[in-house]
Amino acid sequence: MTLLIPTAIIFIVLVGLFFTYLIKLRNSLYIGTLANLSLLVLLVLLVEIISVLNSQFWGIILGLAVALVGLLVFLGLTLSFIFFFINAFIVWKREGYSLSSSLTLITGIAVIAVDLLFFFNPSVGPKPLQGAITMFLTLLIGYVLLTVWNTISSMILYRMYFPRKDKDYIIVLGSGLIDGYKVGRLLGNRIETALSFYRSEIKATGKHPKLIFSGGQGGDELLPEGEAMQKYALEHGIPKVDTLVEDKSINTEQNLAFSRKIIEKDSGRDDNKVIFVSNNYHILRAGVLARKLKFAAFGVGAPTPFYFLPNAVIREHLAFLVMNKRANIAIIVLIALIALGTGLLLYFVPGEPIQ
């Protein structure tokens, strides 16, 4: 009973923080962290409540539920390489061979390597070296899985955004053009999502938000992405007066920064209500970049073909690791130090020989 009240208070605080971030500070990876911490503390709270009630029935139910989830996670992690290999084949078939389309294949090979490490780990070399390597790999794999889960959780939760129909501007983030001049399926989904919000706001309030099509011209493109997107919108019945083009940016951060300058110049204000649109896998990273720029804009996700999502999620996760490289390097160094400490401990304090 003594721990029940503090645990309940911690749970309430975490849930409060989670909803605060989700509603007001959503441009952050913390939404996934807070959600997962809340679930973990909830599990502890349920265990304590069952312990206080001394209920064997609910204890068994909770134990079975945890065991089932644990088994599913274990099987999912162990056998996920099958899914990754199948997905790599599908992506190659539809998108062609490239490094970015091979990320699921690389991940599948990594999963097999980890499986072999844990199931067929040969005991070779001095015990301190074995202990250090095992500790390093175990902590490193655990950290990677934790960050992947946090990224996926944040991506899913970020989509829980239903903006009011009171926006002044809708930024559509650019993507590569097909054959150098055509809007492809992924980019088309972004534009269609923006047009749908544009039309629904006009219908609901009579207010015409302006659409900003943001994207510069790549080396293999015949015109800037912003111009191609504007042309697409005009062909779908959008008045040109309701469109603006940003055609200088070469990445997501510039999409947002340059579009904000256009907004401020067009409106003469810096307090406009803005949303941006990208594919659902990309809006979280765009939101994090918006927060970095201190740009008060949240993202709306456009649909993405399912076969493309695994590669896209892996790519986004790698981008987050690079964005936070200092913190990640510091954690890897800490993991290496713990592993080294484990090796030294086994060297200086060897176990008693078996009689």
Image: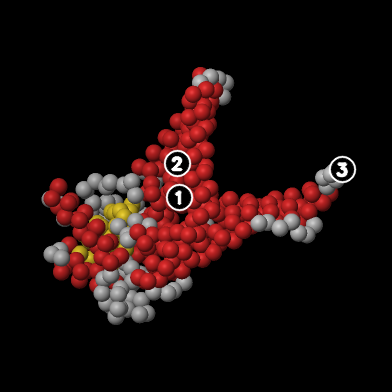
On screen, 214 above or below 270? below
Residue type, numbered disc 3: Gln
Q: Kindly report which numbered mark, 2 or 3, lies closer to the viewer in this rendering.
A: 3
> Which residue does the numbered mark 3 point to in the structure image?
355
> Which residue does the numbered mark 2 point to in the structure image?
35
Residue type, numbered disc 1: Leu
Q: Which residue is located at x 74 percent, y 56 percent?
A: 123
Provide residue 264's location: percent of width, then percent of height: 28, 59
Out of 154 and 64, give the one closest to the viewer.
64
In the rendered view, does 90 fall on the left or right side of 223?
A: right
Q: Kindly report which numbered mark, 3 or 1, lies closer to the viewer in this rendering.
A: 3
> Which residue does the numbered mark 1 point to in the structure image?
29
Asked if the residue under mark 1 is in contact with the one under mark 3, i.e. CB atoms within 8 Å, the reply is no
Distance in Å between CA atoms under marks 3 and 1: 53 Å
Circle 3 crowding by C-alpha within 10 Å: few under 14, some 14–19, many from 20: few
Q: Earlier in the sequence, mark 2 or mark 3?
A: 2
Asked if the residue under mark 3 is in contact with the one under mark 2, i.e. CB atoms within 8 Å, the reply is no
Q: Which residue is located at x 78 percent, y 59 percent?
A: 125
Q: Earlier in the sequence, mark 2 or mark 1?
A: 1
Asked if the residue under mark 1 is in contact with the one under mark 2, i.e. CB atoms within 8 Å, the reply is no
Residue type, numbered disc 2: Ala
On screen, 97 above or below 273? below
- In the rendered picture of this protein, how many numbered marks are placed on residues? 3
Badge 3 element: loop
Badge 1 element: loop
Residue 258 seen in render: no
Q: Earlier in the sequence, mark 3 or mark 1?
A: 1
